[in-house]
Amino acid sequence: MARTRPRIPGSNGTVHPVVPWAQTVLRAPCATVTTFDDQLERLVEDLFATMYAADGVGLAANQIGVGLRVFVFDCPDDEDVRHLGHLVNPVLVEADGVQVRGEEGCLSLPGLRAPTPRWDRALVRGQDLTGADLEIEGTGFFARCLQHESDHLDGTVFLNRLTGLTRFRADRKAARADWYHRAT
């Protein structure tokens, strides 16, 4: 009997350009997914392929120009345990514990990194590709990833979480970036 290798997420997907922050699709709340079909499966495959090609740990659908509540992740936690999956219609239902100011970046804001406050624990509820309910809990860096991707689906980027001098410096650096001025 031949052994089959497990399918690698994204191996059948298409790599899309990552949408820069200035585009309106990143600044508007995403729509709820109501149809669980082959197109949704293709979107998740494309998200994985694009995330891996861009060397990311998470990617939201609006980052490839699709305004639907979907994100994928392949992210370690602070104990270096790998978390791999996707969420459809995710909602951040809990974010608590210790608030940690950690270095954060975003594929839609290339080259911009800043210490960003996030909770050390996050709980997200959503669905899988079939519509079955999912609940994903993360701590440490994985909690940061879950909060970051959930923010994207609500039209927020980590830049919106910054304050004071950190925000001023990040805004100044962003304004000098080529991607900042490419709005649609």
Image (cartoon, rainbow, N blue to C red):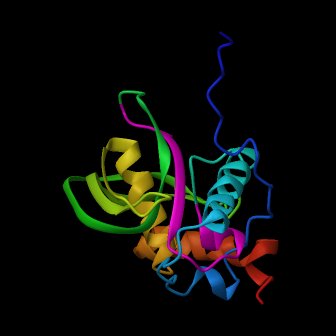
Residue 65 appearing in the image: yes
Q: What residue is at 70 percent from the left and 44 percent from the top?
A: 52
Give the quarter of the image for residue 135.
bottom left
Residue sitting nearer the eye, 70 or 100? 70
The percent coordinates of residue 89 (x first, y second) are: 43, 70
Highlighted magenta segment, given as a residue range: 60-78
Q: Is residue 66 above or below residue 15?
A: below
From the viewer's perspective, tell me whether residue 50 is left or right of residue 163: right
Please state if 62 lies on the left or on the right of 125 as rendered: right
Residue at screen point 67% across, 53% down: 45
Which part of the image, by quadrant, shows the C terminus?
bottom right
Q: Is residue 157 magenta?
A: no
Residue 151, placed above or below residue 101: below
Left or right: 56, with 120 as reference point: right
- Residue at the extreme front: 1
Q: Residue furthest top?
A: 1
* Quadrant in the rendering for residue 146: bottom left
Q: Is residue 131 above or below residue 181?
A: above
Residue 63 painted magenta: yes
